[in-house]
Amino acid sequence: MVDFSKDPTARGFYAPERFESSVFDCEVSGEIPRSMNGAFVRVGTEWLYPPRFPDDAIFNADGFAGMFRFKNGVVDFTGRWVRTARWENDTAAQRQLYGYYRNPFTDDPSIREQTIAQPYLRTLANTNIIAHAGKLFAMKEDGPPYELDPRTLATRGPMTFGGKYRSQTFSAHPKIDPLSGEMICYGYEATGLASNDIYLYTVDKAGEVTREVRFKAPYVSMIHDIALTQRHIVFPVFAFTTSLERLKAGKVHWAWDARLPTYVGILPRDGGAADVRWFKGPTRSIVHTFNARTEGSKVVLESPVTETNPFPFFPPDPGHADPASARHGTNIRRHTFELDSRGEGYTEEILHAQSINGLGRIDDRYISLPNRYAYSGFTDPARPFDVARAGNLRGRVTNCYGRFDLHTGATSAYFAGVTHSLNEPVFVPRSPGSPEGDGYLIGVANNLAEMRSELVIADAANLAAGDVARVILPFRLGAQVHGNWIPEDRLAFA
């Protein structure tokens, strides 16, 4: 018997949906731009069975993929479970077998010995979804990516690139070079639980692994995202850490340790392990990056940055909490690394003081290249959320999308509505050759008042004008982590 009564988050809009779906010719408010031919794909977290521990992290829920397929002004929707080995095992057992987030020592005794020996079997593929070399992948950073059918989202199985990808883990944020078509991907904790090994790979545009580099991080850390330039790869290492002792004690995988410095590793794209250079700075959280570029002897990184713990479900151990002087909130910062210097430090500059939610994006055609605009959700205190109409309110509401000019400091904003909370935005170019910023900003809005989900489409250059269109679903979608726009010419959707 399924019973979610002990899960405090399974209420109202955020209660588990637990069903797969197909909606043909979705209801639309406004008019879908005819140039939008492709698909917005997203993946997130949805509990198939209740968590073994009610205080577990939401990132430990099963992967659920969704696809809004755009074709000639019409949108179809498909939603499917990512049927990982873990999902299949829980389905067979008809209960939750897996314990705390990334801690196999807390699993059910019937599987514990196996998952301790092979922790990558616990992956949920619930964090990001991308297309490369004609294939669609759902990913979570603790195991291999899972290939999905781009037509139906049916799960095809784990992917190891012909056995040439040897890391036990695969990051949720590989980067695709828009010039070469190569995918730069990596795994941290690459040789097992609490290891500080990083394996880096280059996968060419045909899907073949062409390069492997193995090196070590200064300490075991969450390396959730990287940044790419045309000459370098940038690895932020920050104060979430773990150990085998911690895991054997039955705790959730990560703990925030405010005593730890930030390290940023910079590796030449044609370099080896001996060429990695680590720069050291004050405690920061750099979970995601916007973009990076190489300027002569300098590498410039722009990111959403937090000085304190951004995830309360990964709490500090006693004595390791943030100092009272730490700056709260996340804002856009620029870090500059001088490669010709002999020191280990770097400079930091706040580009936008506006607090944002940390899920930042750019126009992906400019990954590794100089770019001007960054996009992120944020909360505008001048636009109050209607709690009475929206009902169940969990956490802070993201009610706006912002476009942040990294050159001039100018900002513009799209407001979703007084009962809507926004997921991560994604930029869609108006056409393949349109200049940066000319296109649409799209993302899923949670309509908490009417208990449904809506895909909003706004003109990225005129966000204040509001919607161009909304795709309205007759039900709620589960929590999204990340999503991406895939043009029709990159994947065989039909």
Image (spheres, rainbow, N blue to C red):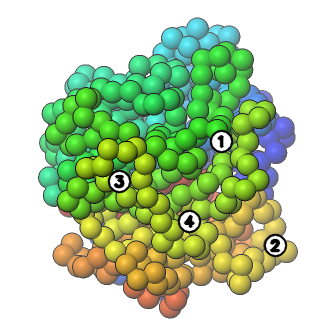
Identify residue for label 1.
Answer: 258
Helix, strand or loop for disc 2? helix
Under tag 3, what secondary structure?
Answer: strand
Circle 2 crowding by C-alpha within 10 Å: few under 14, some 14–19, many from 20? few
Q: Which residue lies at the image location 34% right of the left edge and 78% below the top edge?
A: 437
Which three-letter amino acid code belongs to the residue tagged 2?
Val
Tag 3–tag 4 contact (CB < 8 Å) = no
In the picture, the disc for residue 337 is: 3
Vertical order, 31 against 160 (above or below)? below
Residue 106: x, y in percent?
68, 19
CB under 8 Å between discs 1 and 2: no
Q: Could you tell me residue 376's position as x and y percent?
A: 51, 68
Q: Is residue 287 left or right of residue 176?
A: right
The residue under the point 28% across, 41% down is 267
Q: Quadrant of residue 397?
A: bottom right
Residue for badge 2: 387
Q: Looking at the image, which is closer to me, 254 or 180?
A: 254
Residue type at mark 4: give it. Answer: Asn
Of the two numbered discs 3 and 4 in the rendering, the one whose residue sits closer to the viewer: 3
Q: Amino acid at mark 1?
A: Ala
